[in-house]
């Protein structure tokens, strides 16, 4: 399958709910479904955008300021990352920096801030509960009786066969989920023409028809980027190798695992260099030395 070099570009999820000309309507439908309300298209909302925060290769996050709330949405088509609360914490800090006057933090009186809400929509292949909650405090090395800092992430499995209630109350999300299901089915049958065939089928079946008819080329490019998970695969391999080390294999096996872990770091660094990441950032994220990165 062809690969396109896309840096900090949108996923289909981000485009559909955050950037497309009908994104406001799509997002409001999702917001209404999440909160059991019925805001119409006249509702005021402000899109919030940060570059390359949640994902290495492309953007898969959507954020809006609405009803004195910050609503942050992320889609996962791979295994849900257990560190999402920490990532959302860093994400939220940057959002508040973006929308607040820097001088406000020094005011004597209390300065009210928008209430944050964090949502992850899981659309992956692995078995995952219909809904679950991730908490920042789960990552604390010692568990306090009352955490001084907490962040809660609501995770919903939107795979169509899970029958999540939100799919019945938000038509745009339901159709998006059916579209992703078609993409997976067709790419499994035909890796070369799978995206094109999925788009054609969905148009015929009135699934995201107007959106796909209008933006089929852009959707194709976004799908190509979304399904290029080389960086993720390298990271997951490294995690698997580290887990193997923890199980106490023999010295020879452990040595092989260590070599494999180093190779995974090199593969990750190569991909990051292709996307023009700063060398210092590559060193931080992979643990490689500057000389090792420059030699790639």
Image: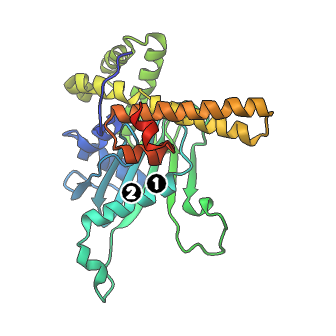
- The 10 Å Cα crowd at callout 2, few under 14, some 14 to 19, many 20 or more, is some
Q: Is residue 240 left or right of residue 55?
A: right
Q: Is residue 147 left or right of residue 91?
A: right
| Tag 2–tag 1 contact (CB < 8 Å) | yes
Disc 2 and disc 1: Cα gap in Å?
A: 6 Å
Disc 1 crowd, CA 10 A, few/some/many (<14, 14-19, 20+): some
Looking at the picture, tell me which residue is in the foreground, 118 or 37.
118
Where residue 149 sits: x, y (%)?
52, 70
- In percent of width and height, residue 228 lies at 41, 26
Q: Which residue corresponds to mark 2?
A: 91
Where 238 sits versus 221, above or below? below
- The residue pinned by badge 1 equals 87
Q: Report the residue at 69% width, 40% height from top.
A: 243
Viewer-side residue, 109 vs 276: 276
Q: Secondary structure at mark 1?
A: helix
- Is residue 156 positioned above or below 136 on the image? above
Secondary structure beneath label 2? helix
Q: Position of residue 193 (x, y in %)?
A: 36, 11
Q: In the figure, residue 168 lies in which quadrant?
A: top left
Q: Nearer the viewer, residue 11 or 231?
A: 231
**Colour mode of the rendering:** rainbow
Q: Residue at x 53, y 45 (%)?
A: 81
Seen at 56% across and 54% down, the residue is: 133
In the image, taking residue 171 as reference, residue 284 lies left or right, namely right
Q: Residue at x 38, y 42 (%)?
A: 170
x, y percent for residue 253: 75, 30
């Amino acid at each position: 399958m062809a690969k396109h070099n896309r840096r900090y570009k949108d996923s289909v999820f981000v485009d559909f709910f955050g950037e497309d000309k009908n994104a406001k309507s799509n997002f409001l439908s999702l917001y209404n479904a999440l909160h059991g309300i019925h805001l119409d298209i006249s509702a005021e909302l402000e899109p919030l955008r940060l570059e390359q925060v949640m994902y290495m290769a492309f953007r898969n996050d959507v954020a809006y300021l609405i009803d004195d709330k910050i609503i942050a949405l992320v889609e996962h088509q791979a295994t849900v990352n257990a560190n999402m609360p920490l990532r959302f914490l860093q994400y939220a800090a940057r959002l508040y920096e973006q929308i607040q006057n820097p001088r406000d933090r020094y005011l004597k009186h209390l300065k009210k801030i928008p209430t944050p809400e964090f949502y992850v929509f899981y659309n992956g292949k692995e078995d995952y509960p219909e809904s679950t909650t991730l908490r920042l405090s789960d990552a604390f090395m010692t568990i306090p009786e009352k955490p001084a800092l907490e962040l809660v992430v609501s995770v919903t499995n939107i795979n169509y066969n899970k029958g999540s209630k939100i799919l019945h109350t938000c038509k745009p999300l339901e159709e998006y989920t059916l579209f992703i299901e078609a993409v997976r089915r067709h790419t499994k049958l035909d890796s070369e023409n799978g995206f094109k065939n999925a788009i054609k089928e969905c148009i015929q079946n009135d699934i995201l028809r107007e959106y796909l008819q209008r933006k089929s080329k852009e959707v194709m490019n976004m799908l190509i980027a979304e399904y290029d998970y080389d960086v993720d695969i390298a990271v997951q391999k490294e995690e698997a190798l580290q887990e193997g080390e923890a199980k106490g294999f023999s010295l020879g096996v452990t040595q092989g695992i260590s070599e494999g872990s180093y190779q995974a770091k090199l593969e990750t660094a190569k991909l990051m260099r292709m996307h023009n990441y700063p060398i210092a950032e590559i060193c931080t994220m992979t643990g490689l030395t500057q000389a090792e990165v420059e030699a790639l």
